[in-house]
Amino acid sequence: MKKRMVSVSPNPQLRYAVGDHPPWPVSVLLSVQTVLLIVAGIILTPAIVLRGAGMDAGLEPQVIFFALLVSGVVTVLQARPAGRFGAGYILLMGTSGAFIAAAISALQYGGLPLLMALIVFSSSLQFVLAARLSLFRRIVTPLVGGITIMLLAVTVMPVAFAQLDVDSPGAPWVALVTILPVMILTFFGQGGLKLWAPIIGIVLGCALHGLLGGEFNLVLPERVADGLTTPVWFGLPELSWPGLDLSFGPHFWMLLPMFFVVTIVGALETYGDAIAIQKTSQVEDKATDYRVVQGALNADGMGNLLAGLVGTLPCTTYSTSISVVDITGVASRQVGLICGLILVGLSFAPLFYGLILAIPDAVVGAYLCILIAMLFVHGLRLISAEPITTQRGMIITLSFWAGIGFQQGAIFKSHIPDWMSPITDNGMTVGTALALVLMLIYNLKTGGKRVFCTTFDPQAVAGLHEFIESYANRYKWPAEQSRRVQLAAEETLLCLLDCRQRDPGQAGELRAEIRSSSEGLTLDIAVGADGENIQDLMIQAAENGHQSMGHLPYRVLDAITDDVRHLQFNNLDYVCLKLT
């Protein structure tokens, strides 16, 4: 097996690292540019949902106000963590396109109160995922996330097509002019120009709509004072809290599984973005820190909880964050903080998002087509992150086509009771649920899983040797393979003890798990969270070569294993060794 060290590679273009403080003019200008790249999506997504559900247009200013406000607050939290909430990196937050189909269904069945209740209750799932991320690592995987995102495109694309089917002057040409610049810049654009492609397409589409005699419906919130009605240029729109629907009727229970599934989708997106932002924000070669991922998930969950309480769509991380850092070389969390404050400020500027809402339907539909197409590509990338074996290929094809079949009502439609229709009519829900079940079965099929627990101290070596020897005798391993696994376990234990420089009087628990499959043998060693990262120390040992004998255990471990991953969580350090 080819050795593959899973680490966060440094960004050679990095000018300002996470903890640096660029000049304020640089930070402010970059923050304004970055916000302009994402703000249209934050504003248009709630408008698309409200219009798709046939809701009163008077709700739009309020829902958009809270969408911008919550997105800004949580962006600040991601940049400046509070406890275990926040990643400490530039992770821009905005309304989640994954919730479009689910939110439209909730609004149609029970209005904003039902939607708010569903968002509040489903947000708890992200806190559970963040707290127990180490337990779900084999089930909630990038493969499942990729399938879900691809099915999201299938379920939401009809909404985009409905926006294109409008009776306005030259609507097809307006949509084409909106999409064409994006295609041209994607193929031929250089550097940061690609990031501006959606905005350029929207501006050109709006310009053509105006030239063809189309109207722009500029709607501003209004305030009544002293018998006069005046538009609100800056300040608060008229706000009213519809309340949570806590009746827990049949529609709540029908839609809750769908919201749980979509929440997992958002969590997977945040999971991937939190790993990617580390890759583009580091000066040195380092392993992925999963405590950062947990912090990002907690902040994402807090954003969803706040969104549900105030009455707007849930938010998620925007991958634009990674692109901006990669291209500009500025990873300073100071930029993320300013971006969040700008979003908060824009929430009090109804004139600004009134201009965004005046964008014609044909342009909105074309923009949504682009967004959904890129989501589909993102799903493909997640799926292809690991080799597609026969088993993984079966999970992908069965889940994806089952999702499409149920979305089109082509599978068991006449046999499904009415109360299950909101679940089974959504292909993303069915496909993701099937992918999770198949992934669980895939992990259960590994043969000969055995677990060993002991005290985490130097004396644990003898117990580990006996545990591995017993396993080897049971499955008739060659003596050479047994000795290799024993040596790998011993070196891992010594490395963990060295990382912590643990006082023998403070020994904790060590848990070892061994399993075999057609892909080889996996030895997992879990101990309490503490100390340095073994992957980082192995990288240092490789760089130092033979200059420092103090790094010898890490060089030995690197030599006798095919792959080493040290996943550090808030509650657990988890070392995974792969051997063939």
Image (spheres, helix red, strand yellow):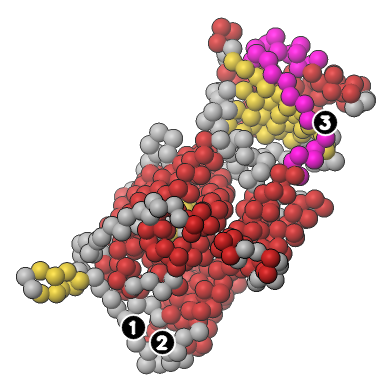
Disc 1 is placed on an element classified as: loop
Residue 293 in magenta stretch: no
141 w.r.t. 466: above or below: below
Image quadrant in which you'd find residue 81: top left
Residue 457 in magenta stretch: yes
Residue type highlighted by circle 3: Gly
Query: Magenta residues, as a range?
Result: 442-466
Q: Residue at x 42, y 39 (%)?
A: 85
410 w.r.t. 283: above or below: below
Disc 2 from disc 3: Cα separation: 65 Å
Residue type highlighted by circle 1: Phe
Neighbor class of circle 2 (other Cα within 10 Å; few <14, some 14-19, many 20+) is: many
Disc 2 target residue: 209
Disc 3 target residue: 448
Disc 3 is placed on an element classified as: strand
Mark toward the start of the polypeptide (1 vs 3): 1
Disc 1 target residue: 216
186 w.r.t. 16: above or below: below
Residue type highlighted by circle 2: His
Q: Residue at x 67, y 22 (%)?
A: 511
Q: Residue at x 43, y 89 (%)?
A: 168
Image quadrant in which you'd find residue 54: bottom left
Would residue 227 be visible to someone looking at this image?
A: yes
Q: In this image, 478 relative to 154: left or right?
A: right
Disc 1 + disc 2, Cβ < 8 Å: yes
Neighbor class of circle 3 (other Cα within 10 Å; few <14, some 14-19, many 20+) is: few
